[in-house]
Image: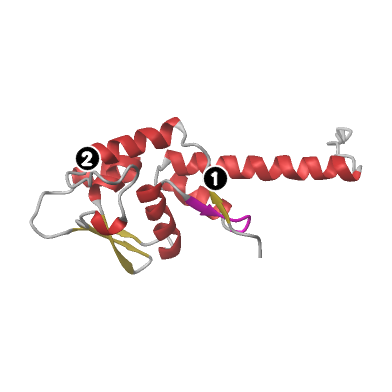
Amino acid sequence: MSPLVLLSAPPSPISISCQTMLHSSLSSWPSSSPGVPPVTELTMDIIVTASGTPIACNKAALTACSGYFSTQLCLAPVSAAPLRLELPTVPAEVFRSLLLFMYTGRLELTTDTVYTMFWYSQMLQIPSAVLKCSQYISDKLSEARAAKKETGAEEAKPSTVVEPIAR
């Protein structure tokens, strides 16, 4: 199992935009919180069912951070009952991690989970999460290259095999 890495790099312009939109769309923003509000202070006004698991969410956070949710929820009719959205192919744990990322701006990644998170971030159109995953992969590749150089191992050079054309 790979060690757990909590990415806390400076926010990208995309995540700043997402957080700015989230901050401006929440009406009950506590003045004492300099960053993202605790999840308990958000109004849970939508139920997202990921792989059969219902998860209470904040519509403003979803629409501010995800193109997919923005599109889906703009098409939803206005009603007094909480909105419901089904994500049958998204694993519940992956969705919970992405939801926490949308609330806090932090994404927990390991070498075992980064590609799954990258895939579902792209699928749900969460550009700031895609960027975090890309940065994590790039950092890991840089570390691997540096380790090869330290040990004196040569990088494998691609070889080209040309096959003669049979007539």
Q: Is 110 contained in the magenta span?
A: yes
- The answer to whether marks 1 and 2 mark residues whose Cβ atoms lie closer than 8 Å is no
Q: Residue at x 20, y 55 (%)?
A: 43
Q: Is residue 24 left or right of residue 147?
A: left
Q: Which residue is mark 1?
A: 133
The coloring applied to the image is secondary structure
Labels 1, 2: front one = 2
In the rendered image, residue 98, in percent from the top left (x then y), is placed at 42, 53
Q: Is residue 6 left or right of residue 153?
A: left
Residue type at mark 2 is: Ser
Quarter of the rendering occupied by the N terminus = bottom right
Q: Is 82 contained in the magenta span?
A: no
Quarter of the rendering occupied by the C terminus = top right
In the rendered image, residue 24, in percent from the top left (x then y), is placed at 23, 37
For this orientation, the residue located farthest to the top is: 13
**Any mark on residue 16, and which?**
none
Residue 95 lies in what quarter of the image? bottom left
Could you say which is closer to the camera, residue 14 or residue 73?
A: 14
Report crowding for label 2: few under 14, some 14 to 19, many 20 or more residues within 10 A (C-alpha): some
In the rendered image, residue 163, in percent from the top left (x then y), is placed at 87, 35
Q: Which residues are magenta?
A: 107-112
In the rendered image, residue 18, in percent from the top left (x then y), is placed at 35, 37
Label 1: element kind: helix
**Label 1 to label 2: alpha-carbon separation:** 26 Å
First reached walking from the N terminus: tag 1 or tag 2: 2
Q: Which residue is mark 2?
A: 25
For this orientation, the residue located farthest to the left is: 80
Q: Residue at x 73, y 43 (%)?
A: 143
Residue 150 lies in what quarter of the image? top right
Residue type at mark 1 is: Cys
Q: Is residue 104 left or right of residue 27?
A: right
Q: Is residue 51 left or right of residue 82?
A: right
